[in-house]
Amino acid sequence: MADLSKSIEKFALANAFQHEGKAQAGSIIGKLIAEDENVKTKLKELAPQINKVVAEVNKLTIKQQEEKLLQIYPEFFEKKEVEHEEKELAPLPNAVSGKVVLRLAPYPSGPLHIGNAKTYLLNALYAEKYNGKLILVMDDTIGSEEKSIAPEAYKLIPEGFKWLNVKWDGPIVYKSDRLAIYYKYAEEIIKKGFAYVCECAAEKLRDCRAKGVDCAHRRQSTKETLEKWQAMLKGKFKEGSAILRLKTSMQHPNPAFRDRVLFRVSDRKHPRVGNKYKVWPMLEFSWAVDDVLLGVTHVIRGKDLMMETEMCRFIWNIFGWQAPTIVHTGLIRLQGVKLSKSKAQKEVKSGAYSGWDDPRTFSLQSLARRGIQPHAVRDFIASIGLNQNDVEVPIDNLYAMNRKLIDPTAHRYSFTPDAVKIEVAGAPEIKEIEVKLHPDKENEMKKIKVGKTFYISKKDFSLLKGKEVRLMHLYNLVLGPTSKFTSKENKEVPRITWVPADFSVATEVIMPDGNVVKGFAEKNCEKLKVGDIIQFERFGFVRLDKKAKGKLGFVFTHN
């Protein structure tokens, strides 16, 4: 608790020193969480202590605050350098430096998102750790109607990997180019007596598997199976009328493992190869074949695929192949995020989402658009590591890591959301003021033209109407439609953000939930370039997304 008390005091002093001598409890809480996520569970009991420290710090003069900061937090005045240090990964079983081969095998139903990027990035991080080889395999079998291929994903997925600085070796491998290989090994499995063509209706098949009894097709001869297999390849079976099944055991203790599907017929058109093929492998069969043929030594996958792993092992044993080392990782659940690739695909297709970079998709493209840095995502995944257990991680952890990267360079500007206009009576004639662009950068200043009319947020106006407030960096007034100037003294009164009506630009901010916040930003923002990340004071970090004459569009990053 002593260390926590020290942190509260140093952050309170730093916040006060940055904001005209007046600290705000909310800003201190954000810094405490960034320093230690466990603080979140203690906020209720810490609130009185934080408020007490804030009150004590605000009684000090700015000079006294500076002197005390130098004593207890001297690093505050040091030049900050951004570091990209990633957490050390646990050793990978059976791994030899220079001989490790891993693969990325995304299914192209959409771009990578923050959830599935975890396993892919772990593969990439281990390839880097062991100076190994990394293969990018596009898992583009035909898929189901519910989970269809999105043609644009062929471009978006590699784009996402490049953004994460993931480098793969050689050209991309497309499963849709390897059907002849899969057919060859399917025929060998048939000849070995481990597969048969089943024409049972789905209900009949489920009943047989549940009871552990053979269906009539399971007893067909190898010759008959080969003939039916060829008939499948020639398009003589319609979709859903025949499947190639693997003979495991109909008495296997797990009914789900009893005679699983190897291949199925599909009449749907494939984005890359059209209707060239009518018979498509299940992903686990293609994995079993490709992992051996491509020389993969290690497979890192989620533990939700353990059944598929057992099927791969069964196939490897049939052929007498040496199996790669397989490591199952726990599933990750992100607090505060609802991830559904199929829902996102539907909303993108319907136009409900603006595209795959809509913040609601949580795709890597959407994170980049928001201003999340790739190193923050890498650090975030590395911090989870090769965990065997399911973990629930707050999305705020990612934001805290990103904040450390962008805060040192993000310039500060004013923005008034849902703005109302006020006029100030009796104020001194002030044409222009100078304000620091960043609290840590003494020599970087911006000029703001003042005038007598201002925009403030509707929320501030509603809560503080009739009370004395301070327009940050300017002066005090009693708030109303026509506000009355009181003094320039730096009083201990509520501080509000403002934008001069004659020095403003219409601004919109797209929020993570898709809502758009409209208001006005100071005109200095028109000098920004698309892609610049700034902080709207007392609102949050944002990234400039679009510029038009007299209008700016930002995307919200995080607080």
Image: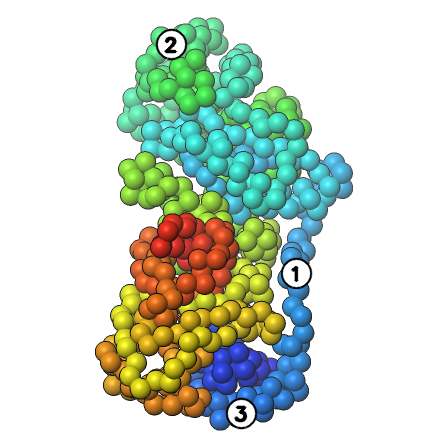
The x, y position of residue 132, in whole percent, is 71, 38
Q: Which residue, given by chain and number where applicable, does mark 2 sit on? A: 235
Q: Which mark is first along the chain, 1 or 3?
A: 3
415 with respect to 171 (left or right): left
Quadrant containing the N terminus is: bottom right
Considering depth in this image, is 110 or 524 the residue closer to the camera?
524
Which quadrant of the view contains residue 333?
Answer: bottom left
Inspect the image, locate mark 1, and give the three-letter code of the amino acid beneath it: Glu
Inspect the image, locate mark 3, and give the three-letter code of the amino acid beneath it: Thr
Badge 1, how many Cα within 10 Å: few under 14, some, many 20+?
A: few
Compared to residue 17, the image places residue 455 above or below, namely above
Q: Which mark is first along the chain, 1 or 2?
A: 1
Considering depth in this image, is 494 or 163 the residue closer to the camera?
494
458 with respect to 195 (left or right): left
The x, y position of residue 129, in whole percent, is 70, 46
- Residue 48: mark in rendering: none
Query: How far is disc 2 from disc 1 in space, using C-alphas?
Result: 58 Å
Q: Which mark is first along the chain, 3 or 2?
A: 3
Q: Secondary structure at mark 2?
A: loop
Q: Are marks 3 and 1 in contact (CB under 8 Å)?
A: no
Task: Tell me what residue is drawn at x 36 percent, y 54 percent.
Answer: 551
Q: Secondary structure at mark 1?
A: loop
Query: How far is disc 3 from disc 1 in space, using C-alphas?
Result: 34 Å
Q: Which residue, given by chain and number where applicable, does mark 3 sit on? A: 61
Q: Which residue, given by chain and number where applicable, does mark 1 sit on? A: 83
Front: mark 3 or 1: 3
- Residue 488 seen anywhere in this rendered image of the structure: yes
